[in-house]
Image (cartoon, rainbow, N blue to C red):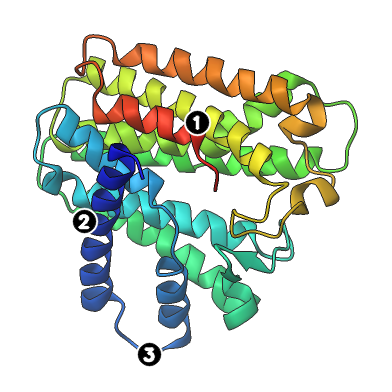
């Protein structure tokens, strides 16, 4: 295990403690939708997006505890998107993070409602913050998650599934919206949580968005393996538009490296060389699961 991986585990633990406390306080009821929410939130995962949010706040010299509500909100939006993406009307997946998907355990209706609740509650978390940047944080989250962001990315992903004629720019756009926007939002919210200047927020958003695209290219490379917690090869079998469907694995790895390098250039002058954010980018590119 590298030094950074050990640091990442600490961030994951820090976030998971905050998440467990929030669940205990707000999702302790036994009704079906609350049970489905708990199941989805506690299904595991690397907590990449909340870790990036917390790391960003610290990298800018702030107290990461100030970014905890934003980190929770980011994970809520991400989890909602996974619950909905797994539904039969979307990607129709049986496994997520190595476990049965939420709709397989609680049924489609309760899974749909759990996702709706998580998305709504995410905005409640950010809107309750008592700082001057709260409105900007709400807007940031809406831009990333809404009809010009992650939702549009999912729509385009569905449109191009098993449909010929897509270009590399079509594929990039899907994942810039579907994955990049939320990672960009995570970094931006971490900066806004400590009330960083907007010029810094904009650059960190671009950093996160670039990482999101590199993350997705790497994810496509891992789809052929059985280490992702998803159904191995599912994307290929369903005719999804992927980087491996468009180029050899060697070129895909090169594309991920180029995108990641461009993203890291946004950090110049903002954080010190060798910072956790740069280490995070290198880890994201080199991950094996």
Does residue 224 appear left or right of residue 135 in this picture?
A: right
Query: What residue is disc 3 on?
Result: 30
* In this view, 105 is above or below 79: below
Q: Position of residue 31 (x, y in %)?
A: 42, 88
Mark 3 or mark 1: name the one nearer the start of the chain. Answer: 3
Residue at disc 1, secondary structure = helix
Which numbered disc, 1 or 2, marks the residue closer to the eye? 1
Crowding at label 1, few (<14), some or many (≥20) Cα neighbours within 10 Å?
A: many
For the residues labelled 1 and 2, the Cα–Cα distance comes to 23 Å
Numbered-mark total: 3
Which numbered disc, 3 or 2, marks the residue closer to the eye? 2
Pointer 3 and pointer 2: residues touching (CB < 8 Å)? no
User: Along the line of sight, which residue is nearer the eye, 266 or 281?
Assistant: 281
User: Along the line of sight, which residue is nearer the eye, 220 or 195?
Assistant: 220
Query: What residue is disc 1 on?
Result: 285
For the residues labelled 3 and 2, the Cα–Cα distance comes to 26 Å
| Residue 27, label in figure | none
User: Quadrant of residue 193 in the image?
Assistant: top left
Query: What residue is disc 2 on?
Result: 14
Q: Residue at x 34, y 55 (%)?
A: 122
């Amino acid at each position: 295990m590298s030094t950074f991986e050990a640091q990442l585990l600490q961030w994951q633990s820090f976030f998971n403690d905050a998440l467990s406390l929030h669940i205990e306080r707000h999702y302790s009821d036994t009704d079906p939708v609350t049970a489905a929410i708990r199941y989805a939130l506690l299904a595991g995962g690397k907590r990449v997006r909340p870790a990036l949010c917390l790391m960003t706040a610290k990298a800018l010299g702030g107290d990461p505890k100030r970014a905890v509500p934003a980190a929770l909100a980011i994970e809520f939006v991400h989890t909602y998107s996974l619950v909905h993406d797994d539904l039969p009307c979307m990607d129709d997946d049986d496994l997520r993070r190595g476990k049965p998907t939420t709709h397989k355990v609680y049924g489609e209706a309760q899974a749909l409602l759990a996702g709706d609740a998580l998305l709504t509650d995410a905005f409640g978390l950010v809107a309750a913050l008592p700082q001057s940047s709260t409105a900007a944080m709400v807007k940031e989250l809406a831009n990333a998650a809404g009809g010009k962001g992650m939702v549009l990315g999912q729509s385009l992903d569905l449109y191009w599934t098993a449909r010929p004629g897509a270009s590399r720019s079509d594929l990039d756009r899907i994942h810039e919206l579907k994955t990049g926007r939320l990672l960009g939002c995570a970094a931006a919210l971490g900066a806004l949580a400590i009330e960083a200047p907007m010029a810094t927020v904009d650059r960190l958003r671009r950093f996160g968005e670039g990482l999101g695209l590199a993350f997705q290219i790497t994810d496509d490379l891992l789809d052929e393996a059985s280490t992702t917690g998803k159904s191995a090869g599912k994307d290929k079998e369903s005719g999804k538009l992927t980087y491996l469907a468009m180029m050899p694995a060697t070129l895909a790895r090169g594309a991920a490296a180029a995108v990641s390098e461009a993203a890291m250039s946004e950090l110049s002058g903002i954080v010190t060389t060798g910072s956790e954010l740069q280490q995070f980018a290198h880890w994201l590119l080199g991950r094996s699961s």
